């Protein structure tokens, strides 16, 4: 029996993308390490499609110690050289270095007594923003909230966190509900936000 549920058009028909849309994107995430992983992966997306990164998700986890910031922060020049040879990830020196840099920034926040989820969710006053877009053309690529979060992340040492990357991250982690109102996931994400 064919799947007849209406979805946001950006996910197309690729089964991996459809699954991501239906089970991850827009659902509020509050786990510090899960948010760290997602922010790092969104930075890897810069200049590429999200589906490219999604297809490499498992190899990214293997390459980056399951996104354990403590382990990543200890990566050496040897580890960087290993990563730059790994065909399972994006082999861009700046992107490889950014995850290591971001792990160090994440740990520095923790050392100051600031949880990562607490730090990020403050930009939406700890409640997901509920949008009611009718078409994909209405959905912004950045907002004042993503600009403020981007600026704050850069200030504490993160990189590959421009306002557009940060807004994509906010959408994915449910800080904003940008499922179209015609999408079956819109109401589900609205209910999860309560």
Image (cartoon, rainbow, N blue to C red):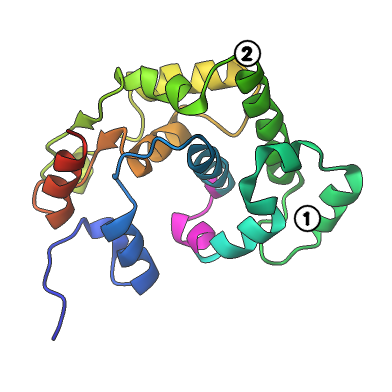
Query: Which label sits in the foreground, 1 or 2?
Result: 2
Question: Can see residue 180?
Answer: no
Camera-nearest residue between 92 and 170: 170
Which range of residues does the magenta coloring cover?
A: 45-54
Quadrant including the N terminus? bottom left
Camera-nearest residue between 191 and 135: 191
Is disc 1 surrounded by few (<14), some (14 to 19) or many (20+) residues within 10 Å?
many
On screen, residue 100 versus residue 191, left or right, reads right
Which residue matches tag 1? Answer: 83
As displayed, is residue 105 above or below residue 34? above
On screen, residue 9 versus residue 163, left or right, reads left
Q: Position of residue 142 (x, y in %)?
A: 36, 29
Q: Position of residue 165 (x, y in %)?
A: 47, 36
**Residue in the picture at 47% in, 20% down:** 119
Considering the whole magenta stretch, tell me its main secondary structure. helix
Which residue matches tag 2? Answer: 112
The answer to whether marks 1 and 2 mark residues whose Cβ atoms lie closer than 8 Å is: no
Nearer-N-terminus badge (1/2): 1
- Which quadrant would residue 137 be assigned to in this image? top left
- Which quadrant would residue 132 be assigned to in this image? top left
**Residue in the picture at 62% in, 17% down:** 156
On screen, residue 148 versus residue 156, left or right, reads left
Label 1: which secondary element:
helix
**Residue in the picture at 29% in, 44% down:** 26
Magenta span contains residue 123: no
Is disc 2 surrounded by few (<14), some (14 to 19) or many (20+) residues within 10 Å?
few
Q: CA distance from mark 1 to mark 2?
A: 30 Å
Label 2: which secondary element:
loop
Camera-nearest residue between 32 and 180: 32
Q: Position of residue 34 (x, y in %)?
A: 49, 43
Question: Can see residue 1?
Answer: yes
As displayed, is residue 45 above or below residue 15? above
């Amino acid at each position: 029996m064919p799947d007849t549920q209406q979805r946001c058009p950006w996910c197309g028909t690729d089964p991996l993308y459809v699954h991501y849309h239906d089970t991850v994107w827009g659902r509020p995430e509050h786990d510090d390490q899960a948010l760290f992983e997602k922010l790092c992966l969104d930075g890897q997306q810069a200049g590429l499609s999200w589906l490219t990164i999604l297809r490499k998700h498992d190899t990214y986890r293997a390459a980056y110690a399951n996104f354990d910031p403590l382990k990543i922060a200890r990566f050496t020049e040897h580890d960087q050289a290993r990563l730059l040879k790994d065909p399972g990830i994006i082999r861009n020196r700046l992107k490889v270095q950014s995850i290591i840099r971001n792990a160090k920034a994440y740990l520095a926040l923790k050392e100051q007594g600031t949880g990562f989820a607490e730090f990020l969710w403050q930009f939406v006053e700890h409640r997901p923003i509920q949008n009611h877009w009718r078409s994909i053309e209405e959905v912004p690529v950045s907002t004042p909230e993503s600009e403020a979060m981007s600026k704050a992340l850069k200030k504490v040492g993160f990189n590959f966190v421009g306002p557009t990357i940060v807004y994509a991250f906010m959408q994915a982690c449910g800080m904003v509900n940008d499922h179209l109102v015609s999408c079956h996931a819109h109401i589900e994400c609205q209910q999860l936000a309560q």
